[in-house]
Amino acid sequence: MKKYKVSYEPSEAVYEYVVEADDEFKAEDKAYEMLQEAIGWDGAKDWCFVSAEEIEMIQKVRPRSEVEKLVTDFVEENKISATYGKDSEGLFVVNFVVDEEEE
């Protein structure tokens, strides 16, 4: 079975899921079910499928406690303003506060 990264977005926000599936169509179906569980059936119908790309599993999925420690250490060492905490099962979201640069 292959792994796919599947993306959905209605605007600037993007939901991405990594799922295992036999092909990208089945990957899209699995990811859409996850999107429905995350934001509800009514909310999910407003989101548009963006892409599904096969990925090689170079990235390692680590235990939540290890990732939390890595993020906390990084934020503290670099004195970065960030918000993070317990999110949904299998997902740890970090938001960094930044100054927008003028172009």
Image (spheres, rainbow, N blue to C red):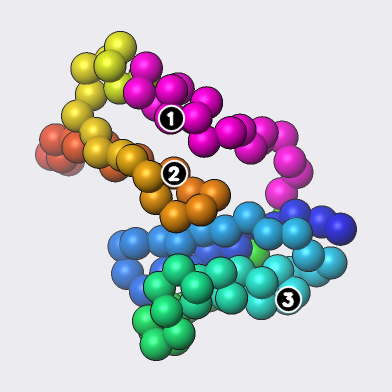
- Residue assigned mark 2: 92
Task: Residue at 52%, 26% (x, y): give it.
Answer: 66
The reply to whether the magenta stretch includes residue 59 is yes
- How many dots with numbers? 3
Where in the figure is residue 48, as x and y percent of width and height? 47, 78
- Residue in the foreground of this view, choosing between 9 and 44: 44
- Pointer 2 or 3: first along the chain: 3
Where in the figure is residue 70, as x and y percent of width and height? 45, 22
User: What span is in magenta?
Assistant: 55-73
- Residue assigned mark 3: 25
Task: Residue at 71%, 49% (x, y): give it.
Answer: 55
- Pointer 2 or 1: first along the chain: 1
Residue 85 in the image: above or below residue 11: above
- Residue assigned mark 1: 68
Left or right for 41, reference 33: left
- Residue in the foreground of this view, choosing between 85 and 54: 85
Q: What type is the residue that disc 3 sits on?
A: Phe
Mark 3 to mark 1 CA distance (whole Å): 33 Å
Mark 2 to mark 3 CA distance (whole Å): 26 Å
Q: Are marks 3 and 1 in contact (CB under 8 Å)?
A: no
SS class, disc 3: helix
Task: Residue at 15%, 40% (x, y): give it.
Answer: 100
